[in-house]
Image (cartoon, grey):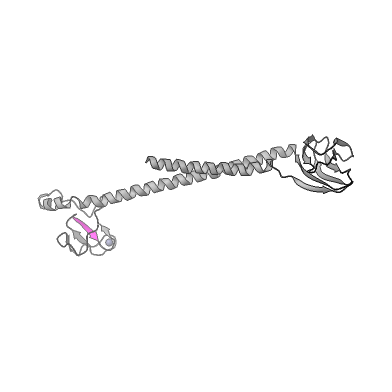
Amino acid sequence: MRGKEFKRIKSVLGVVLLATLLICTMVIPPAVTAMKSRTIPGLGDFTITKEDLSEGDVINYDWYTPNGEDLVFWIEDEGGNGYKTKQVSGSSGSFEVKSNGDWYVKWSNLNSKDVELEYDVTVESAENDTSTLVGYFIILVVLITIVVGLLLYYMKKDYEKEKEKEELKESQQTQQQPSAPPSQSQQQQPQQPQQAPRQPQQSQPQQAPPPPAQGSSTQQTQQQDGKPCPECDTPMRYVEQYERWYCDNCGKYQ
Ligand SMILES: [Zn+2]
């Protein structure tokens, strides 16, 4: 019993672990973003456009030149106003958008040769913040539902297994029970008049004795064809050992 419970706890732990892993793989990727690469030609520019931003949105930027060249970096609005302007070989930070509209993240290469750029620019929308939260919440609810469903499934499976085992035990006991006493009752049978008036046709006890062996033991089984089965009308046999009528067609005592 304790080993079984341990097994169950182990399976539950496995499910919880799996769910945690799932949550991690779904939640972490948006936070971890990969850098993109770009070659800015000598004396050229590179612009990333973020369209239809709203006041309060935040542009997150993270960039560097692997070879250490300086670039002029700035963020610009639709009117051509520049912010955060600097000439460095790398920079990271965030900028809160001052007005609605398109915004540009820009690099200008003042070198005469090409410059490699590694960059990552994302927008954190004030509106999207709540919608991503709702998205995570929905994911969480779905995951919890899956976990609870799996738990219930495993518990039900366990319960059914145990029930099956118990039923098997019970049926084994019921099959053994009637076969044990006959050696005694067979000898006592003629001296027991109380059992005689019992009408076997009317009530069938829950613990039915096993079907009699056909033809083999003629002392125990008397062939008394004639009394028809109440269910199928086939002539039944009277089994003296149990004082009951047995229908071969239905395979049970009637
Ligand atoms: Zn029958």
User: In the picture provided, is 234 more to the left or to the right than 52?
Assistant: left
* 13 drawn magenta: no
In front: 106, or 160? 106
Please state the total of marks drawn on the protein image. 0
Work out which residue is located at the far front of the displayed protein and give it.
67
* Residue at x 37%, y 47% (from the top left corner): 163
Q: Quadrant of the N terminus?
A: top left
In front: 64, or 21? 64
- In percent of width and height, residue 128 lies at 72, 40
User: In the picture provided, is 105 more to the left or to the right than 23?
Assistant: right
Q: Quadrant of the C terminus?
A: bottom left
Residue 142 appears in the rendering: no
In front: 209, or 25? 25
- Magenta segment, prevailing SS (helix, strand or loop): strand
* Residue at x 33%, y 49% (from the top left corner): 167
Compared with 127, 198 (above or below) is below
Residue 252 appears in the rendering: yes
Q: Which residues are magenta?
A: 243-247
Compared with 93, 195 (above or below) is below
Where residue 90 sits, quadrant-wise, is: top right
- In percent of width and height, residue 158 lies at 42, 46
User: In the picture provided, is 18 more to the left or to the right than 253?
Assistant: right
- In percent of width and height, residue 201 lies at 22, 55
In front: 30, or 201? 30
* Residue at x 68%, y 40% (from the top left corner): 31
- Where ligand 1 lies, by quadrant? bottom left
- In percent of width and height, residue 223 lies at 18, 64
* Residue at x 44%, y 42% (from the top left corner): 8
